[in-house]
Amino acid sequence: MRYDQVSYIMGMITAFCECVCGGCKRMALSPPLTEGEYEAVRREAERVIEAHGLRHYHEKNEDAPEGKRWQWIVIYRGEETIGEYLRIRSEGKRPTESLEPFYGVLSYDEKESVHTGYDAYKEAFGGRSEG
């Protein structure tokens, strides 16, 4: 993996930690990560998240179709937030398909949603392939 990719991922994780700490987001999802990317940033990401006094949850997203099985680091403050996220996931909804069901738990403003979350990552990485 390229150094600039690691820097980008860690920059996003740090920025999301600051948003969750500052109260503009209830929780945040890391950029969608391949297994290699997750292993490359896992320790540093956990250190940054914990240094902000936040919690994290690793999700492999194995229920997604082949080619969309990204991994996530879910960054959150309170148990009620991760509980709500997991409830939505248990209904079969996936962030890789649409962030809309997650807007309430992520605290996204719908008007800005196209410029945040997964859509922004797809643009930054040139629309990762699905296969």
Image (spheres, rainbow, N blue to C red):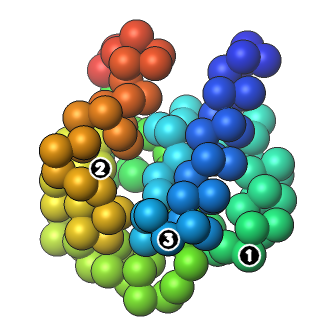
Secondary structure beneath dot 2 equals loop
Lower sequence index among marks 2 and 1:
1
Label number found at residue 22 = none
Q: Which residue is mark 1?
A: 53
Q: Callout 1 environment at 10 Å: few (<14), some (14 to 19), or many (20+)?
A: few
Answer whether residue 20 is visible to the viewer in this image: yes
The residue sitting at 57% across, 67% down in the picture is: 22
The residue sitting at 17% across, 51% down in the picture is: 110
Expressed as whole percent of the image width and height from the top left, the position of residue 131 reads 33, 17
Judge whether 76 appears above or below 58 on screen: below
Q: Which residue is mark 2?
A: 95
Question: Looking at this view, is 57 or 110 the one in front?
Answer: 110
Query: Label 1, label 3: how many angstroms apart (C-alpha)?
Result: 13 Å
37 vs 96, left or right, is right
Asked which quadrant contains residue 105, the reply is bottom left
Secondary structure beneath dot 3 equals loop
Lower sequence index among marks 3 and 2:
3
Q: What type is the residue that disc 2 sits on?
A: Pro
Q: Which residue is mark 3?
A: 23
Judge whether 77 appears above or below 47 on screen: below
Q: Nearer the viewer, mark 2 or mark 1?
A: 1
Q: What type is the residue that disc 3 sits on?
A: Gly
Q: Nearer the viewer, mark 3 or mark 2?
A: 3
The residue sitting at 47% across, 38% down in the picture is: 32
Judge whether 41 appears above or below 46 on screen: above
Lower sequence index among marks 1 and 3:
3
